[in-house]
Amino acid sequence: MIFMSYAGGSLVLLLICMATGEMSEGLAFIDQHGASRINIVIFIYAACGFCGVSCVAALTKRFGALTAALTTTARKAITILLSFLIFPKPFVFGHACGAVLFISGLLARSRQRGGGERRRPPTTELPERKASDG
C-alpha cells in the first residue's frame, strides 16, 4: 500500500514537472553533474525514506497510532531544536511561545488518550498443543 501511494504521488509530480517545464531543468542538472552521482544520491534518499516509513509503520502496529504520532512529532521538534543549536540564529519571543504551546499540546494529548491504557506488544509465543494433536 505504501509503495502504491508513492508510485501515484511520483506520477502526479512527474506530470506537474513536465507541465511547468521543471523536467527539462532537472534533466539538464543531471547531465551537468553526472547521472551516476545523482542516481546514488536518489537511491540513498529513497532508502532512508523507506526505512523511516517502515519504522513508523512498525511503531504504529506495535504501540498504536497515538504513540507513533507523538514520536514523529517529538522527532520533528528535536530536528528544529538541533537546527537552532547547529546553525545559530536569533531566538525571539515567538519561538519561545511556539515551543511552550507545542510542549503543552504534546503533553495534553498524551495525557488525554494514553492515561491509563497501554497496549501490550504482541507476544510471539506458540499456542499450546493439545494431547490429541499428535
Image (spheres, rainbow, N blue to C red):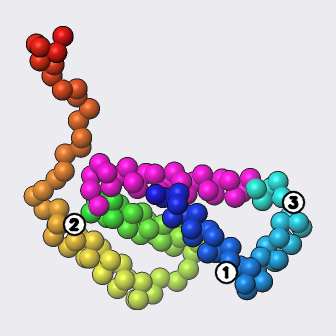
In the picture of the structure, the residue carrying the numbered disc 1 is 16
Q: Is residue 134 above or below residue 15?
A: above
Q: Amino acid at mark 3?
A: Gly
Q: Is residue 59 magenta?
A: yes
Q: Quadrant of the C terminus?
A: top left
Mark 1 crowd level (few <14, some 14–19, many ≥20, 10 Å Cα): few
In the picture of the structure, the residue carrying the numbered disc 2 is 110
Identify the residue shown where x is 26% and y is 32%.
124
Image mark for residue 64: none
Identify the residue shown where x is 11% and y is 18%.
130
Q: How far from the left and from the top, in percent, is residue 71?
A: 35, 60
Q: Is residue 109 above or below residue 38?
A: below
For residue 102, side relative to residue 34 (left or right): left
In front: label 2 or label 3: 3
Q: Secondary structure at mark 3?
A: loop
Q: How far from the left and from the top, in percent, is residue 21?
A: 78, 83
The magenta segment:
40-65
In the picture of the structure, the residue carrying the numbered disc 3 is 34
Please give the count of numbered marks on the rendered protein: 3
Q: Amino acid at mark 1?
A: Ile
Q: Secondary structure at mark 1?
A: helix
Q: Amino acid at mark 2?
A: Ser
